[in-house]
Amino acid sequence: MIQHEKAIVIKDLNKKYYKKKQSSSNLFKNIKSNNNAESFFALKNINLEINKGEIIGIIGPNGAGKSTLLKILAEVTPPTSGKIEINGKIASILEIGIGFQPDLSGYENIFLSGRLYGLSKKQIKSKLEQIIEMFGFADFINTPVKYYSSGMYMRLAFAIITNIEADIYLFDEVLSVGDLGFQSKVIKELEKLKNNGATILIVTHMPMSIYQICNKMVLINLGQIDFEGTPNKATLLFKEILDKNRDVNISISNSINEQSLKTIKKSEISSEIADFNLSNFSISNSLDNITKTINYDKDIYIKLNFSYYFPEDVNIILTLVDMHWNIISTHYIKLPPSKKIIKKEITLLIEKNTLNEIKLMFSLIVANLNGELIISYKDLLEIKLVGDSNISKVSGYVNLPIKIIN
Amino acid sequence: MKKTIEANSKMSIFSYLKLIWDYRFFSHSLAIGEIKNKYAKTYTGIFLSLIQSLIGLAVYWLIFGIAIKIDTGNIPYPVFALPGIIIWQFFSYLVGTSSGALISSEHLITKLYFPRINLTLAKVFPGLVDLAAGFILFVILFFIFGLTPNFGWFYIFPIILVLIISGLAVGLWTSILSLYIRDLSQIIIQITNFVIFITPVFYPGTIVPENFRFILYINPVAGIIEYSRAALFCTAIPDNGYLIGFAIVFILFISAIFIYKNLEKKITDLL
């Protein structure tokens, strides 16, 4: 019967925000403009029941209201109307490593962070060994955390979080940080928490990262619950929404030039110390011209033209994703540092019959060797491979034998 | 543990005070983090603030004690001025840091649940560390100049309590108002730089003419400094006019807690 016990019951939840104009320095104007400011619903009529001991994925496109829902559950912001009943102690991890003081040691930060989550000194002391063991770098526990690598930092933060002993955990995008090693460790820890009877809510816009551990997924779009059910169905529906929302439909062509690249949303972090400009990205069965269809039973060439300058070594990371958002393969291309802008062309080769009939999405990420993002071209190009060979249709994560041929 | 989240849940002042108390570890953690962080960064640590006070004291001694020759009775000027300087430093620190307490902690407020007032309350502890260091310096100076302590020193504890309440009263109000007026904390710094001269920090309140005394009366810090001098040096008790300032900050303090109680949940959206 424990399974039917409810951890969270949300009834008719609404959250209204006011569209803020450029905040004026005038107090009276501010108050006045608040009264007749345009409003919109970040969450509309949300009804949701979450059973004890389940892992729930809350997915949806950016700006759908997922994080707002989590913030309301965490009591960071109040609902505009509606009612929520919560059974148990909540630990909200909306950010990893919250309350860390960079100049203090890992040891001291365990106490600081633990207390922010409401543990007493005694409770933290009793958990200390476990936390340090999970952290895995006992030698560094007395080093100020500002000297930690980002991986160590996150491991320490996560070691603290999993020892809070809450009944309900709220995670916001925890899995979008860290490398694959860290992510799989997080997944393991989440499963451990679940086995101890905890209820876990995870907000993410990358459903595949939590697909395997979720009992259920809730798809939120435009502030409303679109779907609630199996992870499989939810991710498929999510993919459909993304397809519909995509700014440019680029699946018609097999190549992108500078013109159309401008319309693709690209996120940039630093343009002063480094620069990267993709001018052409094309996929073809031929080296010289662009073929209309791409056959998987012929060699596939991926051609990249770009200009760049970087003071340090840099990686171009090419990611292939299938239509179910499974990452098929990730390929690293290391570039040497360059102090002035240089143009470069790289051609990659995927040998025939390594892929099968599949829809593929290419993304390109440029990052330095520490994994810090410089530029990302998300959902750069979508193609459909065709062909006649009888290759069994399986999907999964592989190390594709991609060759750089020039 | 059952909890209900509703749109406009009202809370009684008592349950609010209990909530603040329940989250005392939170304030504690913030305060310890701030203190440790402050001193971990410097080699001189707590001595830095002592050196600062000493240098300041030397300058004021030169100006007010030797050049202008302010009459401080039979108490040597440095011993006379130091309590005022320490008290003023505590007050301006508390007002200065707490007026930006909410805005500068946006990363905590938008990510974690806790009574927001605890952010401002936590600012008291780092101030108290400097206050205690200053008091030790005072005791040393006191004996160097060959003065003898008296039982009046025990009055210093209730006076410090009033000092904390005064700093918090102003700090709590400005922290809330700075959500609406973003540059308020800058304005506050300018105001405190000015108000120090109409507060009897460098001079005894008695040298202010009777018909201008009301400026001191409405200033709580003036009263605190005057009373602390009376306690430390066993001099005449200041006139009752100074109690006006205490009444003002007491009202401000209580009202600020009520304001916080009612705004508590909306603060995230106001940031």
Image (tube, coloured by chain):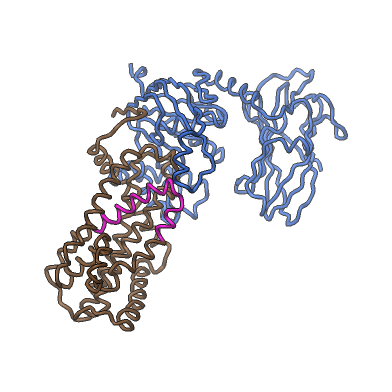
Chain colours: A blue, B brown
Q: Position of residue A21 (x, y in %)?
A: 53, 40
Instruction: Report the number of discs.
Output: 0
| Image location (x, y in percent) of residue A362 | 70, 32
Q: Which residues are magenta?
A: B162-189
Question: Which of B241/A58 is in front?
Answer: B241
Q: Position of residue A167 (x, y in %)?
A: 35, 30
Q: Is residue B29 visible?
A: no
**Image coordinates for residue A240, horizontal then vertical, percent:** 62, 21
- Could you tell whether A45 is left or right of A315 in the image? left
Q: Is residue A240 above or below residue A348?
A: above
Question: Residue at (32%, 42%) from the top-left corner?
Answer: B259
- Farthest right residue in view: A288
Tell which of A188 and A365 is nearer to you. Answer: A365
Quadrant location of the C terminus of chain B in the rendered image = top left
In-image side of A388 versus A219 (left or right)? right
Write the residue at 25% across / 53% down: B248
What residue occupies the far left of the structure in this picture?
A: B151
Q: Is residue B165 magenta?
A: yes
Q: Quadrant of residue B270?
A: top left
The residue sitting at 15% across, 77% down in the picture is B148
- The answer to whether residue A260 of the structure is visible from this angle is yes
Q: Quadrant of residue B207?
A: bottom left
Question: Looking at the picture, does residue A237 appear above or below residue B24?
Answer: above
Of the pair A353 and A3, the residue shown nearer to us: A3
Q: Main secondary structure of the magenta part?
A: helix
> Looking at this view, is B215 or B16 the one in front?
B215
Instruction: Determine if the magenta segment contains residue B141.
Output: no
Which corner quadrant holds the N terminus of chain B?
top left
